[in-house]
Amino acid sequence: MTESQTADVREVQQLGKNLRIAAMNLLARREHSRQELERKLHGKLAPDAAQLGAVLDRLEQDGLLSDSRYAEAFCNARMRVGKGPVRIRAELRERGVADDLVEAVLRELDVDWVVRAQDVLEKRFGSAASLNQRATARRMRFLQYRGFTTEQIRAALKSVASLD
């Protein structure tokens, strides 16, 4: 092996090491999906796809990178701030989490989404039921934007109206 080939091999090994360290630094701050981590590392260090894939595969094997753990943490965080299942599902898909994994995590949450919608409504609008059609429509749009289904919205509005 010539001296330039040896230098190239050392450079590739160093880039692999730098990739792993950068990935672990990002994962130390918070969980990331594989796609999200790949995008960040590619923008930061501009490695070739094969080397980046190998580093990410190794992180998955070591248990440091997990889409299921990321999806679970993400769902819990978004649910706590009042987001519904439709919005959570869409945001996880944007971040590259597989559909079947998203559905499994949402099922495991064991959440009564109607109660969550009621809580979000009460926090935003107070405990008073909407008095007219315009106010009801406003509340429906708000919950729809938050990511609740039509059935969940109707049930939440109906139960809030029955409380008064």
Image: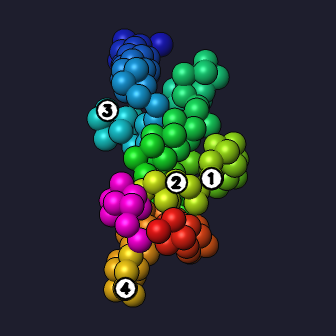
Magenta range is 121-129
Disc 2 marks which amino acid? Arg
Residue at which label 2 appears: 116
Residue at 37% across, 35% down: 41
Q: Residue furthest left?
A: 44
Q: Earlier in the sequence, mark 2 or mark 3?
A: 3
Q: CA distance from mark 1 to mark 3?
A: 43 Å
Q: CA distance from mark 2 to mark 1?
A: 6 Å
Q: How many marks?
A: 4
Q: Is residue 149 visible?
A: no
Q: Earlier in the sequence, mark 4 or mark 2?
A: 2
Nearer the camera: disc 1 or disc 4: 4
Disc 4 marks which amino acid? Asn
Nearer the camera: disc 1 or disc 3: 1
Coordinates of residue 67 in the picture (x, y in percent):
58, 38
Q: Earlier in the sequence, mark 1 or mark 3?
A: 3
Residue at which label 1 appears: 112
Is 149 contained in the magenta span? no
Disc 1 marks which amino acid? Asp
Local packing at callout 2 (Cα closer than 10 Å; few below 14, some 14-19, many 20+) is some
Coordinates of residue 109 in the picture (x, y in percent):
64, 43
Residue at 67% across, 53% down: 103
Residue at which label 4 appears: 132
Q: Earlier in the sequence, mark 1 or mark 4?
A: 1
Disc 3 marks which amino acid? Leu
Q: Is residue 114 visible?
A: yes
Picture quadrant of residue 126: bottom left
Classify mark 4: helix, strand or loop. loop
Residue at which label 3 appears: 45
- Residues at marks 4 and 2 touching, judged by CB atoms closer than 8 Å: no
- Residues at marks 2 and 1 touching, judged by CB atoms closer than 8 Å: yes
Classify mark 1: helix, strand or loop. loop
